[in-house]
């Protein structure tokens, strides 16, 4: 029996309107488990940058999905997660499920903070989301017909957000996942150019991949008038994390869920069928 079944206390989903959080919340609600969304627009609100909101969001909660915004790779993320985890345990939270990232030292420090918090924990260390092409910052580029990034032959085992959500829900509803570390990847490597080619084929329209230099990428981000902190984060993710350090596959999805990870082509076909990328298949 899970902690949530014993107490029926709400599960707080930080980033509950985001790519993984939304999916987790929907699944838990479908199981008749109480859910509280943790976001700036929720009631009570939650904001990583405003620690005065943390206690209100945690009041009466039994478990938490910890998703850090904007990214665990950001400077100071591990300290914030550690402080939050300590507060959560002090307020009676029993279980923490952390969304983490591969090849990110700050994320790995956050993992250790969660492990040391005293809570029952599960770590989900994930590769790049497939949904970044359809629900995030790369969607506009796909729609414009040109995805331009400072990555070349580096290969990434993109993971489906549905697989991540399924693993998180399992961690909240099955005690065998307590104390488990799952590194979640898709079933095969792809370059970003190959991923864009699969999207173009599925969408039935021309979409080009263009490799930029680091300087060109920085200039394009500056032209978009993004906050400097976000520019610095994107530069770090594309120029440091995507340096080949994550060019290996794992069996994390299969270990957590007892089934294979979803392939990128299946994702692309499903998204194309919704029409979000335009074109026709």
Image (cartoon, rainbow, N blue to C red):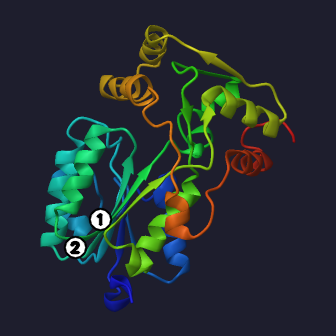
Quadrant of the rendering where the C terminus is positioned? top right
Q: Depth check: 279 or 242 in front?
A: 242
Left or right: where 269 falls relative to 92: right
Q: Using the image, tell me which numbered label, if any, was put on residue 25.
A: none
Question: Residue at left 30%, top 59%?
Answer: 45
Q: Quadrant of residue 86?
A: bottom left
Question: Residue at left 38%, top 25%?
Answer: 240
Can you say whether 154 is above or below 99 in the image? above
Q: Which residue is mark 1?
A: 44
Q: Which residue is mark 2?
A: 59
Point out residue 219 in the picture as x, y percentages from the top left corner.
45, 10
Q: CA distance from mark 2 to mark 1?
A: 10 Å
Residue farthest right in this picture: 281
Point out residue 198 in the picture as x, y percentages from the top left corner.
74, 36
Whether residues under marks 2 and 1 lie with C-beta atoms below 8 angstroms apart, the answer is yes
- Considering only order in the chain, which callout, 1 or 2, is on the residue closer to the N terminus? 1
Question: Residue at left 35%, top 86%?
Answer: 8
How crowded pointer 1 is (Cα within 10 Å; few <14, some 14-19, many 20+) is rated as some
Identify the secondary structure beneath mark 1.
loop
């Amino acid at each position: 029996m899970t902690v949530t079944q014993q107490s029926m206390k709400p599960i707080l989903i930080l980033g509950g309107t985001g790519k993984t959080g939304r999916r987790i919340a929907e699944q838990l609600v479908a199981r008749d488990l109480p859910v509280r969304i943790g976001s700036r627009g929720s009631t009570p609100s939650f904001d990583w940058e405003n620690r005065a909101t943390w206690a209100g969001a945690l009041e009466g909660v039994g478990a938490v999905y910890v998703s850090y915004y904007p990214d665990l790779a950001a400077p100071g993320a591990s300290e914030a997660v550690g402080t939050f985890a300590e507060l959560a345990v002090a307020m009676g939270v029993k279980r923490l499920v952390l969304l983490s990232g591969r090849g990110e030292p700050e994320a790995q420090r956050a993992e250790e903070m969660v492990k040391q918090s005293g809570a029952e924990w599960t770590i989900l260390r994930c590769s790049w989301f497939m949904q970044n092409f359809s629900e995030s910052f790369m969607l506009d580029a796909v729609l414009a017909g040109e995805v331009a990034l400072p990555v070349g032959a580096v290969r990434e085992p993109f993971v489906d957000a549905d697989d991540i959500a399924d693993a998180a829900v399992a961690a909240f509803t099955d005690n065998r996942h307590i104390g488990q570390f799952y590194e979640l990847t898709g079933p095969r490597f792809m370059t970003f150019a190959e991923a864009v080619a699969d999207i173009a084929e599925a969408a039935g329209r021309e979409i080009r991949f263009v490799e930029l230099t680091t300087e060109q990428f920085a200039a394009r981000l500056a032209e978009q008038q993004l906050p400097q902190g976000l520019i610095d984060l994107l530069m770090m993710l594309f120029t440091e994390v995507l340096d080949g350090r994550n060019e290996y596959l794992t069996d994390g999805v299969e270990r957590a869920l007892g089934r294979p990870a979803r392939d990128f082509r299946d994702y692309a076909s499903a998204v194309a069928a919704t029409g979000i990328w335009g074109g026709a298949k």
